[in-house]
Amino acid sequence: MNTNKWNTVLAAAALALTAGMTQAQVQTLAPPEVPGAAKARMESIKVHSRQIEGNLLGTQADRDVIVVLPPSYDRERGRRYPVVYALHGYSISAEQWTKEIRLPQTAEGAFAKGTPEMILVLPNSKNVYNGAFYSNSVATGNFENFIADELIDYIDSHYRTLARPESRGLVGHSMGGYGASRIGIRRAERYGALYLMSPCCQSPSGARGLTAEQVKQIQGLSSADASSSLPFGLRGTLALASAWSPNPNNSPLFVDLPVDASGKERPEILAKWIANAPLAFLDQYAWKVRRYRAIALDVGDKDTLLEDTRRMHEALRALGIASTFEVYQGDHTSHVAFRVQDYMLPFFGRNLSFSQRK
């Protein structure tokens, strides 16, 4: 993939924010409020992760997590609920994503329109490079293990959940869609249903057009914090390298890039990047993935990630794994709030177990 196309993909995945405006909030379309919808309660907590402790980039091990509790949670004290874990995209935080997908309004709307009530959990994975890509890395910390193990254990021990795989869902958008596919494939035994919204990075894509000049620009940084000066696409490349090709001996950035300072591709690093593409490892875990009650994928018809999402759906089908795939009218971000209320939450309402048995 050439440099311009890679920058376009990352820009879409991060909602067209520039390096100097990463805190800006993209305005997404909001579905109308459902009259009479009961109110959900949204709370912010911190969850400590031993898996993220000691990472080389200094990412805090106390992770911000947003929990959305359904309207009946405080009233029906003996009731337990399924949980959906929802992963945000690159360059934004979990808090910013709640604004883009219009929580708690969209959850309240879904419940009011007949979706059974569930708990939503949104962990924050933003770091100094703008995103950890939900991977295990000595540079970023082991975010995959945090999401699939520690976070589930914490939520099950602190909230009234139905603490079993068939009552857990996993979803993500953009970088979060990558995280949901990565974790949802590799750790499928932890979840009962999987939903991928415009997932990025499904296919192996080589060095992404990285040039010698860009490598020198990255290598010239004096610290990880100095990466904020990089153009948006290069900062994304650095984030991918920290997740997929970390190097503890390469201070201060702690990464290996897939291209050297002369512009020559490095096959040993490219091999690591390829190995982290879900389409490269899906077949290894197909026996786990077949256990899902349901898998869904969706993407906008004007989204640059359309074909990559289609490839994942076709790969699942080729392995005999049932999944649904929908292309809707919209770009990368325009209709995500509609999708959450009218498609994603109802999907989990149909496919998770709500049985109150122990």
Image (cartoon, rainbow, N blue to C red):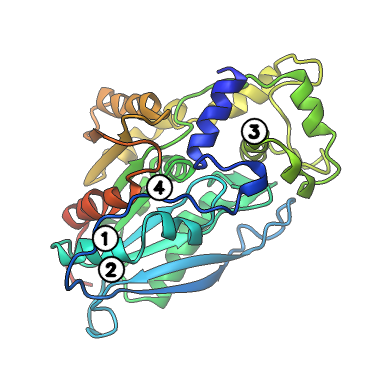
Q: Which residue is mark 3?
A: 237
Foreground mark, 4 or 1, reads 4
Residue 167's label in the rendered image is 1
Please, what secondary structure does the residue beneath circle 3 have?
A: helix
The percent coordinates of residue 207 (x first, y second) are: 62, 21
Q: Earlier in the sequence, mark 4 or mark 1?
A: 1
The percent coordinates of residue 305 (x first, y second) are: 41, 30
Please, what secondary structure does the residue beneath circle 2 have?
A: loop
Please, what secondary structure does the residue beneath circle 4 have?
A: strand
Q: Residues within 10 Å of mark 3 (few under 14, many from 20)?
A: many
Q: Earlier in the sequence, mark 1 or mark 3?
A: 1
The residue depicted at 64 percent of the width and 33 percent of the height is 237
Disc 3/disc 4 C-alpha distance (Å): 20 Å
Q: Do the residues bearing badges 1 and 2 touch, measured as CB atoms within 8 Å?
A: yes
- 286 relative to 120, above or below: above
Side of 198 relative to 117 (left or right): right
- 87 relative to 250, above or below: below
Q: Which residue is mark 4?
A: 172
Disc 2/disc 4 C-alpha distance (Å): 21 Å
- Amino acid type of the residue that numbered disc 3 sits on in the rendered structure: Thr
- Amino acid type of the residue that numbered disc 4 sits on in the rendered structure: Gly
- Amino acid type of the residue that numbered disc 2 sits on in the rendered structure: Leu
Q: Residues within 10 Å of mark 4 (few under 14, many from 20)?
A: many
- 164 relative to 309, above or below: below
Foreground mark, 2 or 3, reads 3
Foreground mark, 1 or 3, reads 3
Q: Which residue is mark 2?
A: 162
The residue depicted at 36 percent of the width and 51 percent of the height is 170
Q: Residues within 10 Å of mark 1 (few under 14, many from 20)?
A: many
